[in-house]
Amino acid sequence: SEHSRPATASLILCGCVLVGGVFHVVIALPPPPMSVYPFSMLMAPMYVMLIPAETGAALRALLGRPASVHAAIIAAAAAAAAATHMLSGTDRFEYPPYLSYEFGICWIVFAFGGLAVVALANVIPARTDKHANMHARARATDAADAVGSFGLPTTRVRFAMLLPAIALGIVGALPYLGVRTHVAFAMFSNLRIEGGQSNHFLVKRTLLDALGSGALRSVEVLETDLPSLRSAQVDLFPLLPAATRSAVVGLNLTSEFYIAPPNAWPTALPAPFRPFMLPLIEVRRRVAKAASALPDFYFRYRYPEDGADGEREYRHARGLRTAESDPALAEPLSFLQAVFHRYRPFHTAYSPCRH
């Protein structure tokens, strides 16, 4: 009926909040260097957007409580934050160093716990008709207040609320279109569109050509002393807690945890350098930047299509490119290329899942 549709939609959205909240708490629990908790913290506001009227009604009810209740909540939150910060482990390696892992987990549990309470209050049907009607009126009041505060028609308010989700959707789709794979929302994805060897069901070479993808031609970096290339991929497995490493080895799992740092790695690599592949346009970005800042560097490389005998060398000595070096590798990117084309390392022979 006309009245059951909104109620059904609300129940579905509240169920999504409950399931999503559990998911984000669970994935945030592994300690650094996994560091997934900032992602879960960023996602909490998006779940509020799923049930804005219900969350608004709960907040109004909370604000209507006595001042002593507010003071108790603030004191409890401050005490929990202080305690978790004091208990933060100082021997953990985290890159980048976000904040206190314990504090982050505490925030996530409280945030998603609060959302769970709001969602459960709308999912559990054990309410009298009187309370249900009161709740429906509260939701209607919140919706009316939202429209009135914007001074816009309901459709325009809804569109404005969808704009962040639309923007996130576009950014999230870029890896699947071959435009950008770093930094991307597809964490630890085995999707590969680089190097002309797409394993995507839909996005094949023809479409990547049409989109002007910068991921089609790739370079295999065999050896280098250029920091921005040498640390393009970093294996964090040696930095995992000892118990985690032992469990992985005991289960005969692959002991690799590759990430693509957004900046040069600040310390010595935790694992020996291993050859990797990188789209040519990403190599150009890093080499062109280094050519104007570093007097000496080199890297040995080959194009995968040339086979094992196609090894070449690029060398920068005393601030100048040597005659044998290919100038195309140091060609600066255009403004649009620099903005839209950013790629993570990959390899067709090992570690298909990268972050």
Image: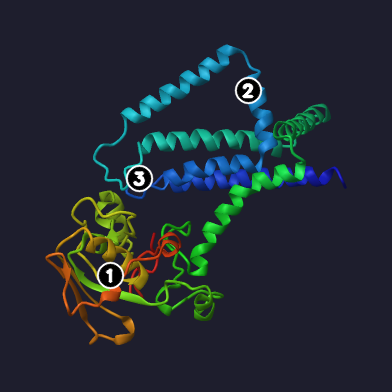
Q: Is residue 255 visible?
A: no
Q: Toward which corner of the image does residue 127 lie, by quadrant?
A: top right
> Considering the numbered disc 1 on the image, is that residue within a helix, a strand or a loop?
helix
Dot 1 alpha-carbon crowd within 10 angstroms: few under 14, some 14 to 19, many 20 or more: many
Q: Position of residue 176 (x, y in %)?
A: 52, 67
Give amino acid for label 2.
Leu
The residue mark sitting in front, 1 or 3, is 1
Dot 2 alpha-carbon crowd within 10 angstroms: few under 14, some 14 to 19, many 20 or more: few
| Mark closer to the chain start, 1 or 3 | 3
Vertical arrangement, residue 283 with respect to residue 303, above or below: above
Q: Residue at x 76, y 41 (%)?
A: 154
Q: Is residue 18 visible?
A: yes
Q: Is residue 80 left or right of residue 247?
A: right
Q: Is residue 217 left or right of residue 289?
A: right
All told, the count of numbered labels is 3
Residue topped by disc 2: 62
Q: Position of residue 337 (x, y in %)?
A: 42, 65
> Considering the numbered disc 2 on the image, is that residue within a helix, a strand or a loop?
helix
Q: How far is mark 2 from mark 1, CA to CA?
A: 60 Å
Q: Position of residue 268 (x, y in %)?
A: 18, 54
Give amino acid for label 3.
Pro
Q: Residue at x 83, y 30 (%)?
A: 129
Residue topped by disc 3: 31
Q: Residue 330 got which mark?
A: 1
Q: Residue at x 43, y 71 (%)?
A: 214
